Image: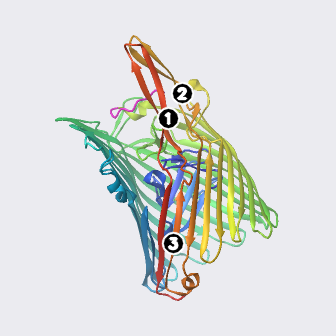
Amino acid sequence: LLPGVLSGGEGNTGFYVRGGGPDQNLILLDEAVVYNSGHLLGFFSVFNADAIKSTKLYKGAMPAEYGGRLSSVVDVRMREGNNKYHRIEGGLGLVASRITAQGPLQKDKSSYILSGRRSYAFDLAQPFIKNTDFAGTNYNFYDLNTKVNYQFSDRDRLYLSGYFGRDVLRYQSGERAFYFDMTYGNATATLRWNHLLSDKWFMNFSLIFNDYDFELAGGQAEFGADVYSGIRDWNAKLDLDYSPGTKHYLQLGSQYTYHRITPSIATATNGEIEFSNDLQPQYAKEAGWYVQDEWRLHPSLAVNMGLRLSYFQRLGPYTSKSNGQVYEQGEPAEDYWGLEPRLTLRWRTGRNSSIKGGLARTYQYLHLVSNSTSTLPLDVWVPSSELVKPQIGWQYGIGYFQNLFSDNYETAVEVYYKDLQNQIDYRENYVNNVADDLESQFVFGTGRSYGVELFFKKRFGDLNGWIGYTWSKTERIFPEINQGLPYPTTYDRRHDVSVVGNYQLSDRWSFGAIFVYGTGNAFTPLKSLYLIEQNLTVEYGGRNSARLPAYHRLDLSATFTPKPEAARQRRFYSDWTFSIYNVYNRQNPFFVYYYLDTDLNAGSAKASAYQVSLFPIIPSVSWNFRWHNGQN
């Protein structure tokens, strides 16, 4: 809902920042990488608001402490739990429910938080679909956040946090002739030690684990198929902060990551016949070292200068595409280094105005490849190799920021330009075959994105909210695609608008509204059909030369607090939230498919386009509650 940050749209679990792909966003939960940030095909976020303490978004020049992605950073930190008193809060709704418990393990020294969610909309719908073609179909998600911490001394504190979440989809035809099951999810764990070395030096050391996996299984009669993919990381990280005085704030550190990537391992059975593509896991090491200094040159001018050195090593098993050399498991096969300068400045031009600008060079050694029009859980992560070079990006941006009327209003205008190298895509007319060597199906090119972002926000008062607008253009250039001519990416969106409003009518009633509009995603259209000697030939138009209909949606909500004064005084209180998603039931496009109607005897063929939509109008009611045993 912010300028420059675009939703993937209907059924899309990713998001896009200033023309970057969904894989070019570094999403962190307590320093652990989250490879898929959506539940229910993007309808819910994997981040449970009840468990979240803070969120930082860097959509321009990211600080040097972050690496491994080209476009943006979303750094999410979990709450640590109340170390004074116990508290329980949650909500019961028609679509999903949640509950969170937190409190001290040892007062003022140790605390915990435990938070869980579960959806069940399809469970409630089972009686209504038992006599339809969707009988037996179900889709739900669940997740769990947990964190504990202990303060050993005035200088030392230890944190242990974790996340586990799964999406589970089961489709079964009414006649039980066909089925497919899909499961995917993330798991993370972080052990962090904070240590105050002196009044000027602070240390943070972390051991981090994260895992993402996806499995799709389906079948009909004697035929069955199963596809599995995933990525797992082990990470060690050291950060040091140094505060010598009021003019400088120095940060430096290092990071090491070991990747284990499971490609699309596929098996198929037909009666007693079994096939497997026998793909092996892929391994790699990644490291980074950084230093940055926030230097206050003048009371009105501050500069953040940083430098990051990154390193990536592809490990065996791997076979060289150039000379056929075979590398055994764990044997170094290919090395890459990257030097990444970062610079941002902030100049206060007046008491309520400033100019901010920055530039950054970034390297990315992992690639997400997709053969669909939207970011789905089945997309495959691929490490850099001899053939697949690291992605490299340069980003430049500058903006003017002005607060008005006693800082009650915020305004901003920003422009940016982004240059991308070593972008990856499938070759023209590629048809997914599980037996293929994926690297042989890739082509490589460049990309660019530029745009203007406008933002207006009212901060205080009974009526508050904001309006954001983005004009942008995102292109790719591949010699082997579209005759070498520039073409828009799937997520190129010329116009994107978001309007958010909140109104406090009284102590009992508050209202909210969200409206979003975006230019439709680009796709490659079917141009014509030919029957030549009773053989059907399909001709497609230029790559991404057509557009889906525009995406727009209005959501409304109302919150009712029965006893607002008692809510502020009592240990237990509750409220009700009423919401309507997609108020006017807009049939936003998920994708378009073609139905081919051919008559070989008559020598005729025609194609009809059909749009698939996912989420209709969805009303919901939830009862929210909170209890604590402390003082108000």
Q: Which mark is residue 425?
A: 1
Looking at marks 1 and 2 on the same chain, the residue that comes earlier in the sequence is marked by 1
Residue 429 lies in the magenta-colored region: yes
Which SS class for mark 3? strand
Q: CA distance from mark 3 to mark 2?
A: 53 Å
Q: Is residue 587 above or below residue 299?
A: above
Crowd tier of the residue under label 3, counting other residues whose Cα lies within 10 Å: few below 14, some 14–19, many 20 or above: some
Whether residue 629 is visible to the viewer of this picture, yes or no, is yes
| Residue 442, above or below 619 | above
Image x and y of residue 461, in percent? 71, 71
Q: Are marks 1 and 2 in contact (CB under 8 Å)?
A: yes
Disc on the earlier residue, 1 or 3: 1
244 left or right of 324?
Answer: right
Which residue appears at 62% of the width and 46% of the height?
A: 518
Q: Amino acid at mark 1?
A: Asp
Q: Which residue is mark 3?
A: 576
Given the current orientation, which residue lies at the most extreme right position?
350
Tell me the mark number nearer the camera, choosing from 1 and 3. Answer: 3
Horizontal side of 48 relative to 73 (left or right) equals: left
Coordinates of residue 609 in the picture (x, y in percent): 49, 31
Contact between marks 3 and 2 (CB within 8 A): the answer is no
Quick check: 228 above or below 77? above
User: SS for tag 2?
Assistant: loop
Q: Residue furthest left?
A: 272
Q: Quadrant of the N terminus?
A: bottom right
Residue type, label 3: Trp
Q: Which residues are magenta?
A: 428-435
Badge 2 is on which residue?
481
Check residue 475 for magenta coloring.
Answer: no
Main structural element of the magenta stretch: helix, strand or loop? loop
Residue 303 lies in quadrant: bottom right
Amino acid at the residue labelled 2: Ile
